[in-house]
Image (tube, rainbow, N blue to C red):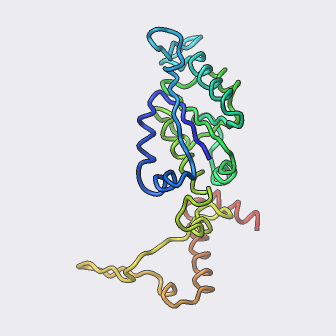
Amino acid sequence: MKFSFVSLFPNLLEFYFQDSILAKARRKNLFEIEFYNPRDYTINSYHKVDDYKIGGGAGLLMQIEPLYNTLNFIKQNEKKSHFVFLTPSAKLFQQKDAKRLSKKEHIVFVCGRYEGIDERVIEIFANEVFSIGDFVLTGGELPALVLCDAILRNVSGVLGNADSLEEESFEDNLLEAPSFAKPFVFENKFKHFYTPSEFLKGNHAKITALKTTLAFCKTKFFRPDLFLEYKRKK
């Protein structure tokens, strides 16, 4: 699988793939990444990529020409490219999207800056447009990394233990049940903190039932919207 990042600041992105699980997966050639800077596709001597908005308004906007040239170059050379734009004015990215996109051969993340991207570029190239939440960031690099990470977790071989995916949050519209690591009892000067004793008894059916109950309660408390969807589908 291949990921291309279109960004004015590729150095903000590359470091993320230098450690941990994704670094190991990259060394195994389970995926590859590349970076395109629209400044390299300008035709003006100053490599200018932004300008004032037509019709007025605060701030500058990424121009159409550098981005068009960049994305058109990718499209001409990568026939199966799937272009994803990151913007707060889009539908929310979800786990089901991560699973679906993990089947793509080549995903191109287009990262906006300044006050965003000329809408004509989105109309011409976008296959999908996503937001990671109802808030505004300085640029699209962080959302692109969020999507890439979520997608890669669903690519075969990336996780050390594929069974980890089975108990992830958002499976069947439930949040993941609380998890605990050894020791069973954590002691400090004033209190003892215990994990549920059922986890130590080795009865896998009861452990599974307890995890389901805990996931049910957690979802009802933290995400009542998901809880209602879970109840509706049941």
Image quadrant in which you'd find residue 212: bottom right
Question: How many numbered discs, if any?
Answer: 0
Q: Residue at x 63, y 24 (%)?
A: 73
Residue situated in front as seen by the camera: 209 or 123: 123
User: Residue at the right extreme?
Assistant: 233
Note whether 55 is above or below 101 in the view shown.
Answer: above
Q: State which quarter of the image contains the C terminus.
A: bottom right
Residue situated in front as seen by the camera: 120 or 220: 120
Judged left or right of residue 165, residue 182 is: left
Q: Residue at x 68, y 26 (%)?
A: 76
Give coordinates of residue 172: x percent, y percent: 68, 64
Give coordinates of residue 189: x percent, y percent: 23, 79
Give coordinates of residue 87: x percent, y percent: 58, 34
Residue situated in front as seen by the camera: 198 or 104: 104
User: Residue at the front extreme?
Assistant: 28
Image quadrant in which you'd find residue 110: top right
Give coordinates of residue 196: x percent, y percent: 47, 83
Judged left or right of residue 53, residue 20 is: left
Note whether 194 is above or below 53 in the view shown.
Answer: below
